[in-house]
Amino acid sequence: MLICAGGRGYYQEWGKEPRELHPGDIVNIPANVKHWHGAAPDAWFAHPAIEVPGEDASAEWCEPVANEDYEQLK
């Protein structure tokens, strides 16, 4: 789970459009969903992330977001 505490950021699940995040926004991320999150290209982004352990599930760090994809964000 991500909780946007400040700034402006993005969350995007694999194969879906990115979602812009603002203070107070909460994103529930189901287990085994490939995604990325981070600051908007022109902003800072602060967020606590909460991971709830589950059976046969864990966080997995994937490859970095390609610059071409990141730079297309507004």
Image (spheres, rainbow, N blue to C red):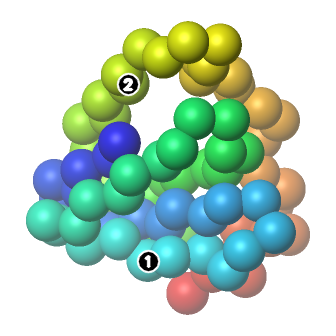
Q: Earlier in the sequence, mark 1 or mark 2?
A: 1
Q: Nearer the viewer, residue 24 or 69?
A: 24
The image quadrant that residue 58 belongs to is: top right
Q: Residue at x 36, y 22 (%)?
A: 52
Q: Is residue 5 left or right of residue 50?
A: left
* Type of the residue with mark 1: Glu
SS at mark 2 in the image? loop
The x and y percentages for residue 34 are 72, 45
The x and y percentages for residue 44 are 34, 58
Task: Name the image quarter holding the N terminus.
Answer: top left
Count of number-bearing discs: 2
The x and y percentages for residue 27 are 36, 57
Q: Residue at x 52, y 44 (%)?
A: 30
- Tag of residue 52: none
Q: Nearer the viewer, residue 31 or 61?
A: 31
Taking 62 as reference, is 13 above or below it? Answer: below
The image quadrant that residue 15 belongs to is: bottom right
Q: Nearer the viewer, residue 68 or 53?
A: 53
Q: Residue at x 49, y 66 (%)?
A: 10
Q: Label 1: few (<14), some or many (≥20) within 10 Å?
A: some
Which residue position holds label 1?
20
Which residue position holds label 2?
51
Q: Nearer the viewer, residue 17 or 46?
A: 17
* Type of the residue with mark 2: Glu
SS at mark 1 in the image? strand
Q: Alpha-carbon distance for marks 1 and 2?
A: 21 Å
The x and y percentages for residue 17 are 67, 80
Q: Label 2: few (<14), some or many (≥20) within 10 Å?
A: few
Contact check, label 1 and label 2, Cβ < 8 Å = no
Q: Is residue 24 visible?
A: yes
Taking 36 as reference, is 43 above or below it? Answer: below
Q: Residue at x 55, y 87 (%)?
A: 74
